[in-house]
Amino acid sequence: MPHHISVTVDGTSYEADVEPRQLLVHWLRDDLGRVGTVVGCDTSNCGACTVLMDGRSIKSCSVLAVQADGSEITTIQGLATGDEWHPVQAAFKECHGLQCGYCTPGMVLATVDLLAENPNPTEEEIRDGLHGNLCRCTGYNNIVKSVQHAAGLMGGTK
Amino acid sequence: MTEVVDTPTAFGRPIRRKEDAKLLHGRTNWTDNIQLPGTLHMAMVRSPMAHARIAKVDVTAALARPGVIAAYSAADLGELNSGVPCVWPVSGDDTVMPPFPALATDKVRHVGDVVAVVLATSAAAAEDAIESVDVEYEALPAVVGMLDALSPGSALVHDQATNNTCYVYDLGGGYDEAAAKADVIVKRRFVNQRLIPSFMEPRAVVAAPMGMSDEMTIWTSTQIPHVLRVLLTLVTGIPEQNLRVVAPDVGGGFGGKLQIYREEILALQLARKLGRPVKWTETRSENMVATHHGRDQIQDIELAATKDGTFLGLKVTLLANMGAYLGIITPGTPLLGMFMFPGIYKMDAYQFRCTGVFTNTTQTDAYRGAGRPEATFAIERIVDELAAELGIEPMELRRRNWITHEEFPYTTVAGLTYDTGNYEAATAKALDMFGYDELRAEQKRRREAGDPVQLGIGISTFTEMCGLAPSRTLGALKYAAGGWEHCTIRLLPTGKAELVTGTSPHGQGHETAWSQIASSIIGIPVEDIDVVHGDTGRAPYGMDTYGSRSLAVGGQAIKKAADRLVENARLIAAHQLECAPEDLEFVEGTFKVKGDPEKATPIQAVAWAAFSAHNLPDGVEPMISGAATVDPEDFSYPHGTHLAAMEVDTETGKVRLRKYVCVDDVGIQVNPMIVEGQVHGGVAQGVGQALYEGAEYDPDGNLLTASLADYLIPSAADLPTFETGTTVTPSTTHSLGTKGVGEAGAIASTPAIINGIVDALRPLGVTDVLMPASPQNVWRAIQAAKGGAA
């Protein structure tokens, strides 16, 4: 039995009937075509599928589409404001915080959540805060730098 | 060096990447994003058994499931069941090359082997129908470990491989004579464990017949669209001119996407047969059993030396696990390390033997470094063991034996000629950054105080051969293809340029770096250059990206093509400025008449003149372009010194990487920011091998580490900040002076970590620690050294 859901994704309201077993990430990708959000592992280890649900980061491979009913989802495609990049996006470019870019949508959105919680994280807090998002390219050096740089851009003290 | 290096241009600067905007906004084109009308989704029926005879495969019930359009066993597919080719039969006719059919025919040979394929109108329907395929297996004894595989009476993975031996390959000799003169011989058995590449984007493929033509297009998450096109043509019979291979955005590879996979063959064959697009995307758990693995060697190493520490000879006897089948370069991968066991050291004799062994496990093949990390691990570990045996400080022992910077070019005992290097300079810089003497002093204090957490210092002074590769050398090693690279640069009418490269990036930043090289020669801005890659329809010639070759080889093609473009433009510019071509100088994008600088024209204006073609000199064609295909003169030899400070809890076995310093010499750098990023990522993977990662099988051949919950690739919380530095010793055999950087970190770092752990524990009698050096493995090593139960 399909369930009816109402979800706002990147500022657009959607009404849809979804299978109870459909994962949020598959609904975003396959039904809405929001393919900026990706699947990396199916087991909620890698965090590539991270999106913001009502402002908090979640792994969209571990949430059913029906659970998103009534919520506001922000994906990597909805983070910038028009042509204006979100400071976290700008920081990742400035600090070379990405290589292949596959983990990047999740890493960026997890960072947005991290900095909302803690605007001035220490290196250790950054590393702990992002431990649910795996990157195989960067060794995390420049991801940590990117988060620190973003904190500065967003008004933190370092 | 070259004129490129000295110009005040984009070359050599840490320019931020062109690639990033789309990646940071999700405007990406991963293969799994592609949704073509009428697509059939393919799902694989994989063997749950490591070794079994296939008694029956019946797809009838699956065909009755909702949404299922087709399903096939090997027998159903018949001639379309093409085999995966191996292009590197290392010892020629002596190498056992068993068939590797896309769908298994007589037996399954590893967990994850494929016995049938289902196609349905949705991925979920295909996945659901898998369970309706009726397969009967007759279990056979699983051959899991290499030592068991080689023991008499073992079951055979392939009937034609006696004792499960794929090949035996020898190089060098004379070790016994050298050893006879030795005061000391250290012998160790090292295990270089099996790893899983674990790129973040799972593999995906879409194959489709295109419109009314005979063309088939295949989009696939691959490192090697060009090589793949040739191989797919050879195995499917689709004429090469009708086959287009596209590597869209590719999310990492690390060698794991240097392959022709059965799923690619099946998607192409079935799209052609059914006349519809066919799509397949692997799950992570499929990735773990179906994407090739790396490493997996048992290394018996002997180093013979005089009592003052002079190396005399090295003997290397390897068992290399092939897995169940031979992929594209499975047998050759250990031989990419064959020349590197002597490392940076001088010695009189080197004797190498490698035995390739079949087992009921996923096939192995290239993984970042491919053979060279294994070799570097062995030599850097055994040098530390010799240092301990002789009581010589381990860095001092290295100094006594390494090739000094005055000795280049130097032909090693393995037969390679290293063009340049300066191990002294890189080491001096690394020791300084590390605070080596202070850490040694701290180590001494803590040893004397009996601190339960001991400090160890790990050293790795390495070199590698990369920039694969001179085609003649590859031919001599019986590799089927060459190692050249191609570039075409076209000036467009509006003064922009299109740079078509045969390299195929998947995270390395080629679009930025290649633009920097071309910009510095043809003088148009980096942002005005579009780099076209990864599509045989738009970039028809190339040898792709692996083996740290893209810059080392492809960069030379870019330089040559850009130089040719400028010479081409010069003819038209001279005509416009009414002078002889040789009277023009070309400075930062402008042709100027020598001695009359007012008479000048920017190359962009020349581009328009060529396009309009109203006033060209006689015999000059209305096109400004340059093309070059460059075969490298030799390998390139990056080197460096990596140092690790390891805190080891002697009571619990817990290990902490406290400080990591590396100084790499990758020659001239096009973009130091990208170089540094490559080193960070490589080091992280090498640390991953040392501390966290390891593919584990149970005795029945089940992969125990079949998800990212069980196979531990390091997270941010598991690693420190790496401190990197560089020295610059330009390559003399590569026209840009570059050497390559993709694999350096992964090659160098693993032995630094393990040497550090063993160094911490040596006073307890520990001489080796199994990788990954988990608390359990470290604790066991400590207990074994104490003589307790391990």
Image (cartoon, rainbow, N blue to C red):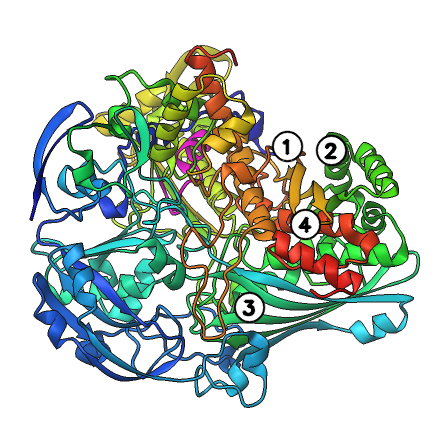
Q: Which residue is mark 1?
A: B723
Q: What is the CA distance from the residue labelled 4 to the residue labelled 1?
A: 28 Å
Q: What is the CA distance from the residue labelled 4 to the residue labelled 3?
A: 50 Å
Point out the stretch of residues depicted in magenta: B500-518
Considering the image in quadrants, where does the C terminus of chain B appear? bottom right
Name the mark nearer the viewer: 3 or 2.
Answer: 2
Q: What is the CA distance from the residue labelled 2 to the residue labelled 4?
A: 27 Å
* Residue B392, x across and y down, in percent: 88, 51
Amino acid bearing label 2 = Phe
Number of the label disc, if any, that sits on residue B425 = none
Residue in view at x 80 percent, y 53 percent: B762
N-terminal label among 3 and 1 = 3
Tell me which chain the residue with mark 3 is part of. B
Tell me which chain the residue with mark 4 is part of. B
Q: What is the CA distance from the residue labelled 3 to the residue labelled 2?
A: 42 Å
Amino acid bearing label 1 = Glu
Label 1: element kind: strand
Amino acid bearing label 4 = Thr
| Residues marked 3 and 1, same chain | yes
Q: Which residue is mark 2?
A: B434
Q: Which residue is mark 3?
A: B476
Q: Which residue is mark 4?
A: B652
Name the mark nearer the viewer: 4 or 3.
Answer: 4
Asked if marks 1 and 2 touch (Cβ < 8 Å), the reply is yes
* Residue A60, x across and y down, in percent: 27, 39
Instruction: Determine crowd level at label 2: few under 14, some 14-19, many 20+ residues with C-alpha closer than 10 A.
Output: many
Asked if marks 3 and 1 touch (Cβ < 8 Å), the reply is no
Name the mark nearer the viewer: 2 or 4.
Answer: 4
Q: What is the CA distance from the residue labelled 1 to the residue labelled 2?
A: 9 Å
| Residues marked 1 and 2, same chain | yes
Image vertical order of residue B674 relative to residue B252, above or below: above
Q: Is residue B508 magenta?
A: yes
